[in-house]
């Protein structure tokens, strides 16, 4: 009897496996391993497979075991497909009926064993191994390919190939300038970057074009403001309309490579356009956890199991599996460096120059640096953040604090105020860890460049609030906590210098193209360095602009809310009145005298901005005509929520 039960279970498991593999191919993106999908779905089907197998084995204990196994393939497939029936799929119901009919016919009319024992045994072993692989390799990155062979440089380029520098643009996601030693911070968070500032060029008043990741990155990639490239919200991605820096450099003979640690700028959202290699394997849907989310939320079987409850508990099978696949880890700078060093080695072995873009996510919440950096600067009671938390749990508490902060409900000296201060302490720990890893990129750049000139630009896409102006996190306004970002350069031809004038990260692509020898600009981006690698004077950058819209909107070229205009150290906050195409002054600050924006000057700057405002409204209205809605899958909503970006309708 026991052997009959085992053979029946094998048949059920095989049937379920066939269906799970078929579902895996239908629900898996190009970046997801179907081994992991099979493991997730096998977990769902196996409990019911065991029950059906036992019943079938007991009922057919005297039957031919091979016949019993073969017939039990049908209920095994039915178990995997049953959740689809729950959702009313007519085609699935028809297929199930035909399958059961075929099974009954085979069991009644067939005279011999339906499947040889060896085939059953081998297939069962394969099914179990597939599931095991999915569990044992939960975070295997997808294959991003290799750099193509060297291409010929554009004949219009002014520089000889060997004079064209290797260039790296490094974005330190969520790093605000005020917490770096070279910008006056006294905690000693960034000794390496402080050394870079001393050896190279430091722009003391660099500004981001947006207050969160996608709009600022899109500006770095296109040389356009958010109102021009259309990437104003987190979920929208980079549109196909503007030409990118990577496209220009690739066409001009550069090897173009990117390694990113932020999910919202992964390659599938358009930010990888033009890069010959855009390695987002650290954040793409490649691991068991990410694939599990996709299966849980987007397939019929996941939705059906989510409705179930385990006996004597309020837990669903979905919650049980989710607890095993949720990750407590954060993508670290060391992982980005490992990938970057590999790609730099490949590019350095070729004859052509290379452009490298890196994005580090360490300073972004949940501010849980590895030891010994975690509590290096901790001076306040972390309260609910005392122990490292899973990302979603951290975000939920962080959001509660943000709501209280926005409402002005956090009193000085309260436990919530202590937690906010502790978050800043932990943020500084993240900065210290990140800083400790950055020298690796410079060392590798020197090694692979040889006699070729090289340049590394360090900057950020935005900063972070820790209670200033009654705010937490980022993406909510255009105060200096998010807009004042570091901008440092180090290179083989640079001499130490500090630039006091106000500049924009919008000019990073113009700088890269100029030093590469390209003649045509990109968007409105102007170079920060002249042909002799010397900084341009501040007068060359009369106006700097930052723009803010709702980061949760599901539309490109969406409505903006505020604009900040810098006339060197004079900053004007403007509100938009779209109906009349007018700006209204919210406040004006003299950052030279009041860098914390604590007391508005009361000045009226609209007259001096009249010509700029007329042109801005014309461009803004033209862009709004290209607005398109964006649809998100449920798994994308989950990943965005973990980063603190809840969508409008989610």
Image (cartoon, rainbow, N blue to C red):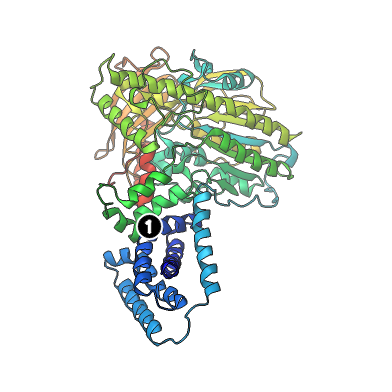
Query: Residue 370: percent from the left, percent from the top?
Result: 50, 28
The image quadrant where one finds the N terminus is bottom left
Classify 185 as above or below 450: above
Name the one closer to the observer, 546 or 448.
448
Name the one closer to the observer, 222 or 6.
6
Q: Residue at x 57, y 42 (%)?
A: 258
Q: Which residue is mark 1?
A: 44
Query: Residue 433: percent from the left, percent from the top?
Result: 53, 26
Classify 374 as above or below 554: above
Crowdedness near tag 1: few (<14), some (14–19) or many (≥20) residues, C-alpha within 10 Å:
many
Q: Residue at x 45, y 87 (%)?
A: 111
Horizontal side of residue 338 vs 30, given as left or right: right
Horizontal side of residue 32 vs 474, given as left or right: right
Asked whether residue 363 is in view, the answer is yes
* Element on which disc 1 rests: helix
Query: Residue 365: percent from the left, percent from the top?
Result: 41, 31
Quarter location, residue 493 = top right
Q: Residue at x 45, y 65 (%)?
A: 17
Query: Residue 163: percent from the left, percent from the top?
Result: 73, 36
Name the one closer to the observer, 172 or 531.
172
Which residue appears farthest toward the right when viewing the image?
451
């Amino acid at each position: 009897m026991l052997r009959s039960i085992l053979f029946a279970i094998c048949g059920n498991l095989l049937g379920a496996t066939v269906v799970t593999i078929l579902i895996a191919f239908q629900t898996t993106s190009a970046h997801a391993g179907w081994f992991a999908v099979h493991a997730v779905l096998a977990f769902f089907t196996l409990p019911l497979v065991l029950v059906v197998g036992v019943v079938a084995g007991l009922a057919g204990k005297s039957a031919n075991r091979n016949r019993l196994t073969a017939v039990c393939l049908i209920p095994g497939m039915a178990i995997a497909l049953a959740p689809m029936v729950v959702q009313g799929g007519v085609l699935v119901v028809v297929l199930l009926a035909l399958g059961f009919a075929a099974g009954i016919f085979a069991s009644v009319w067939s005279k011999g064993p339906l499947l040889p024992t060896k085939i059953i045994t081998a297939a069962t072993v394969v099914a179990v191994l597939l599931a095991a692989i999915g569990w044992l390799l939960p975070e295997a990155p997808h294959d991003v390919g290799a750099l193509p062979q060297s291409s010929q440089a554009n004949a219009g380029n002014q520089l000889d190939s060997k004079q064209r520098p290797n260039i790296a643009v490094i974005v330190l996601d969520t790093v605000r300038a005020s917490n770096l030693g070279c910008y006056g911070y006294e905690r000693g968070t960034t000794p390496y970057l402080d050394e870079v500032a001393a050896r190279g060029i430091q722009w003391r008043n660099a500004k981001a074009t947006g207050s969160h990741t996608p709009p600022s990155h899109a500006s770095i990639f296109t040389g356009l403001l958010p109102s021009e490239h259309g990437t104003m919200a987190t979920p929208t991605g980079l549109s196909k309309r503007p030409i990118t820096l990577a496209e220009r450099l690739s066409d001009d003979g550069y090897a173009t490579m990117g390694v990113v640690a932020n999910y919202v700028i992964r390659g599938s959202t358009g930010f990888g356009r033009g890069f010959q290699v855009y390695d987002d394997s650290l954040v793409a849907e490649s691991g068991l956890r990410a694939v599990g989310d996709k299966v849980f939320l987007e397939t019929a079987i996941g939705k059906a199991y989510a409705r179930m409850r385990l006996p004597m508990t309020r837990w669903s099978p979905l919650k049980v599996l989710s607890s095993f696949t949720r990750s407590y880890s954060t993508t670290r700078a060391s992982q980005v460096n490992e990938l970057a060093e590999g790609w730099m080695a490949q590019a350095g072995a070729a004859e052509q120059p290379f452009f490298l873009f890196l994005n580090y996510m360490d300073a972004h919440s949940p501010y849980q640096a590895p030891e010994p950096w975690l509590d290096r600067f901790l001076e306040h009671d972390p309260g609910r953040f005392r122990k490292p938390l899973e990302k979603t749990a951290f975000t939920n508490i962080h959001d509660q604090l943000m709501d209280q902060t926005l409402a002005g409900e956090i009193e000085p000296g309260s436990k919530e105020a202590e937690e906010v201060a502790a978050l800043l302490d932990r943020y500084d720990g993240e900065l210290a860890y990140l800083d400790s890893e950055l020298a690796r990129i410079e060392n590798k750049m020197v090694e692979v460049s040889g006699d070729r000139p090289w340049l590394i630009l360090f900057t950020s896409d935005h900063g972070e609030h820790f209670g200033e102006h009654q705010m937490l996190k980022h993406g909510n306004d255009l105060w200096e906590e998010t807009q004042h970002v570091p901008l440092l350069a180090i290179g083989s031809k640079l001499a130490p210098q500090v630039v006091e004038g106000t500049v924009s990260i919008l000019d990073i692509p113009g700088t890269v193209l100029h030093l590469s020898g390209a003649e045509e600009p990109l968007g409105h981006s102007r170079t920060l360095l002249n042909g002799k690698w010397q900084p341009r004077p501040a007068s060359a950058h009369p106006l700097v602009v930052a723009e803010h819209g709702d980061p949760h909107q599901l539309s490109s070229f969406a409505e903006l809310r505020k604009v900040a205009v810098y006339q060197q150290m004079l900053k004007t906050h403007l509100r938009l009145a779209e109906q009349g195409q007018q700006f209204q002054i919210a406040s004006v600050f003299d950052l030279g005298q009041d860098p914390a924006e604590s007391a508005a000057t009361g000045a009226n700057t609209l007259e001096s901005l009249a010509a700029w405002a007329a042109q801005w409204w014309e461009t803004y209205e033209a862009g709004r005509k290209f607005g398109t809605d964006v649809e998100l899958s449920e798994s994308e909503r989950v990943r965005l929520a973990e980063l603190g970006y809840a969508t409008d309708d989610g």
